[in-house]
Amino acid sequence: MAVRTQHEQETNSIYFVTFTCYPWLPLFHQTNSYDLVYKWFDYLYTKQIRVAGYVIMPNHVHVMLYFPEMKKSLNTVMGNGKRFMAYEMVKRLEAANENQLLQRLAANVKESEKKKGQLHKVFEDSFDAKKCMSNEFIYQKLDYMHHNPTSGKWMLAKDFLSYAHSSALFYEESVCMYDKLMRIEDVL
């Protein structure tokens, strides 16, 4: 059974959020679904939720979200985003005839989830969210996420500024794949 944490809802708040593919499979990479995260960011923008930093890894996403108003709960925002991305990722796996992987993702759907219409387990049920209570914490998380592609086992780029699916270069040189990114300094 999934552990569901109800995150507090507070206007004018920043959250550091992480969500992960099930079970840590590199599904963003395998399905070339980085664009789906950017589409989700665009959707959030239409709902006045701002992205202040991000990194899209092969199997997980770190994002810093700013909520000038909390019209929907963080749980709803994240659930809707993950659902949208999951449907599209499954379509891409089907188009690529990744039947063995699709069977693996289908085999892990719980009966209660099947009754609700879920066919594949693309993401872990829960997500991690931390409310950013201080500038120090915000900059620590930005630094952590921006260096994630070049830390530990990853080594996805020569240096953290050259990883394409990250807001790191935006903070250094105002260059970014996502054109609606908001500087954290604009809300502090």
Image: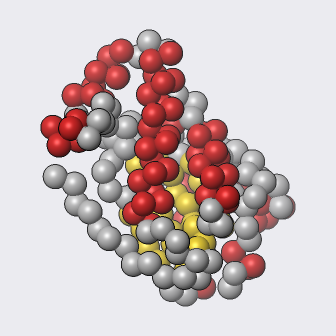
Residue 75: which quarter of the image? bottom left
Residue 153 seen in the current view: no
Expressed as whole percent of the image width and height from the top left, the position of residue 81 reads 49, 50
Quarter of the image for the C terminus: give it.
Answer: bottom right
**What residue appears at the point 41 percent right and 53 percent down from the top-left corner?**
79
**What residue appears at the point 33 percent right and 47 percent down from the top-left corner?**
124
- The one nearer the camera, 164 or 132, is 132
Residue 135 seen in the current view: yes
Expressed as whole percent of the image width and height from the top left, the position of residue 73 reads 44, 69
Q: Tell whether 7 sits left or right of 158.
A: left
**What residue appears at the point 48 percent right and 24 percent down from the top-left corner?**
91
Expressed as whole percent of the image width and height from the top left, the position of residue 141 reads 54, 70
Above or below: residue 39 compared with residue 79:
above
- The one nearer the camera, 78 or 142, is 78
Q: How is the image coloured?
A: secondary structure
Residue 45: which quarter of the image? bottom right
Expressed as whole percent of the image width and height from the top left, the position of residue 140 reads 56, 75
Q: How many marks?
A: 0
Q: Tell whether 3 sits left or right of 152.
A: left
Residue extending farthest top: 97
Q: Tell whether 158 sits left or right of 21.
A: right
Residue 107: which quarter of the image? top left
Above or below: residue 114 compared with residue 168:
above
**What residue appears at the point 37 percent right and 44 percent down from the top-left corner?**
123
Q: Tell whether 148 sits left or right of 1.
A: right
